[in-house]
Amino acid sequence: MIGRDLLGIEDLDRDEIERILDTAGHMCEIGTRDVKKVPTLRGRTIINLFFEASTRTRASFEIAGKRLSADVINFSPSSSSLKKAESILDTAKTLDAMDPDAVVVRHGVAGVPRRIADVLDAPVINAGDGAHEHPTQALLDCFTVRQVKGRIDGLTVTIVGDILHSRVARSNIHVFRKLGAEVRVAAPPTMIPADIEPTFGVKAFTSLRESLEGTDVVMALRIQNERLEGAFFPSVREYSATFGSDRAKLQYAKEDAIVMHPGPINRGVELSHDLADHRPSVILDQVRNGVALRMAVLYLFAGRPRAAAVAGGTG
Amino acid sequence: MTRILLRGGRLLDPGDDTDAVCDLLIEDGRIVGRGNDLRVEGATVLDVAGRWVAPGFIDLHSHLREPGQEYKEDIATGGRSAAAGGFTAVACMANTHPVNDDPATTDFILDRAEHDSPARVYPVAAATKGLEGKVMTEMAALVAAGARAFSDDGKTIMDSGVMRRVFEYSRLVDAPVITHAEDRTLVAGGVVNEGPVSTRLGLPGNPGLAEVVHISRDLMLARATGAHLHVAHVSTRGGVEQIRMARDLGVHVTAEVTPHHLTLTDEEALEFDTNAKVAPPLRSADDRDACRAGLADGTLDAIATDHAPHALHEKELDFREAPPGMIGFETAVGVTLELVRSGELAPLEWVRRLSTHPARILRVAGGTLARDSIADVTIVDPERAWIFDPAKGFSKSGNSPWAGRALVGRATHTIVGGRLVYDLERGILT
């Protein structure tokens, strides 16, 4: 039984993860039809509550909801009404009083979806909280790898880039570890979180080459130039030279290794152009699968009878 | 003439190392005698058999929020909460609005305390004007008005040149300079201890290094100037080690540790509970154990609560925006008695760190039950099991990680200046 909320991969067990991935597999076909709509969530209301700007994730959730015939409302409190003193919980409770069937939350600070879930009747789906978790991204990444490789067990996945500030990295570490993959992270020492090896059971590298040896999956993360340059790494040029991936560096990985990126890409920084656009890149598969995966999540979390959903768990 | 006879309690007086079952007689605000089976005409007799009778507990570190933030706490409610926790006196930090950086504000606080607070209040004045870390305050005038120590507390003075002058100048007034030792450039926005917890939660980490580096700077400045440095709320193994080394070098340093840093770890934050957000942050189990050992071996002199009330709507903000701090007066006894039960502190040593040492650090009366000393007395039932419910407490705020938790040990009576101001059964007595 899956819990009421989807707050993070850390809370899920292997069976729950596989159930979500299997459901996403069934959803894929809907996206290939001429009429990309099924009545599954007709009459259900889903609120996208995005405190932090997002284009891709929000669009992906919106399309997923609409393909299932749900009514999707986007709510993005403006930054002006988000002054410190204003309570996020008040905003959430206000929306809850409109009886949505699920609230999809994104916030710039870790833990906010959990705090919101504590006060809401509706199920909460975390669409990214600070540097904590981004569970649907990790699930769609995992789904994509399984689609291409046929399995997760026994694979080696290397996540490259700003691990310290990345919710995508954290959720992916959890999901791939739980499904039996070996996970490595590679970054300049300034961007590797404290005690990551014992905390997450991963191996940390400060040499890209060493981290790629024997790797099946290379996952590059977006580097936030504007915020981090000078403080966490000296320059984009140096970052690109040491941790950017291109075809030459990919030679260190397994011959059939694939390249992933959660987007949006800084071209020429994390990934060279040719690597971003062509196989072995599966970046557009990730985006496509993102819709199917989020359909599965909405179906599983927003599609339950309301009373059962409320009684179903503590989140 | 008012007389109180405390009958049959276990007298714990670090002043002369007494630990014995004995009666204690109080008369007109003074301790006048002790002995077995004292019989006194006209005395109010309190049967305190099975209880501990100690010189009044003195809290070196608290925030009473008045003037300026009375929605969190005021001197009346903070003073009542202190008395209910067994504290006969509390020192209050200067981060009020306006800041306690001039004699008029110090005077206001003392005036309020005299009228409204059952516990004594010792104002800690700002070390620099407006807590801005630039211009030092008029220490002589502030001491004349009643300030007992100087500190910019959480607004740590980062400018080492300013800090040096503050230390030097403080020798003029013979008052301790209290530092909240965290290098802000190393804290860098961190809100939980840097380590496995910050890594798991994806919250910005505050490294223990920020404290260790800053403590060592202040120790060297204190050494060079001969000032009395009091290090607030030590939270790290490295901090304890630095203080131990400096004391061996002859530095005039004292230090305190909070009940929360003695008993909790950063794992309290794993559910994103903002009641576990405090500055400095809750640290690792290793740091906590080092603080306990440091308190036991005397490297850390005192237990201080850092009682820091915040309103519910403030603690309901997200973990980054929510203000740091927790209330602590009423839970301090129950929380820290854990160290007595575990054998880490003898009862007498526990009392020394709550009473005798704080009195000496602030250069105030108390800390002893010797004849003719002021009759500030705390009576504790070390066995009493209870559940802390902030709604039943005296503070205006309820931000405590111990809310709803079971504690063992509680203050049952608080006597200030020979007058019973708190009785567990009857509450605050006015």
Image (cartoon, helix red, strand yellow):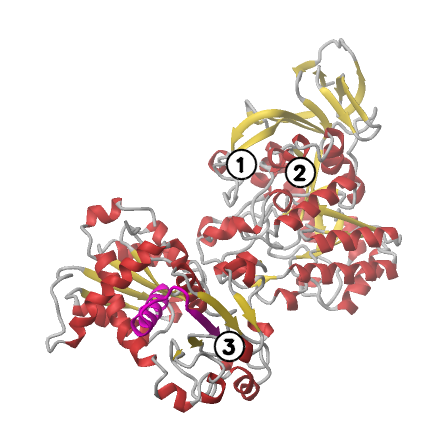
Residues beneath discs 3 and 1 located on the same chain: no
- The label nearer to you, 1 versus 2, is 1
Chain letter for the residue marked with disc 1 in the picture: B
Q: Where is residue A102 in the image (x, y as percent from the top left)?
A: 25, 58
Disc 3 target residue: A213
- The question of residue A151 being in magenta is answered with yes
Q: In which quarter of the image is the C terminus of chain B?
A: top right
Q: Same chain, marks 1 and 2? A: yes
For image coordinates 38% across by 64% down, the residue present is A153
| Secondary element type, mark 1 | loop
Q: Which of A136 and A26 is in front in this view?
A: A26
Horizontal and vertical percent for residue B114?
66, 38
Tell which tag, 3 or 1, sits nearer the viewer.
3
Of residues A248 and B165, which is closer to you in this image? Answer: A248
B398 to the left or right of A64:
right
Image coords of residue B193 (percent x, y): 59, 57
Q: Name the residue under label 2.
A: B114
Q: Name the secondary structure under disc 2.
A: helix
Q: Circle 2 marks a residue in which chain?
A: B
Q: What residue type is labelled 2?
A: Glu
- Circle 1 Cα neighbour tier, 10 Å, few/some/many (<14 / 14–19 / ≥20): many
Residues at marks 1 and 2, CA–CA distance in whole angstroms:
18 Å
Circle nearer the N terminus (1, 2): 2
Name the foreground residue: A160 vs B389. A160
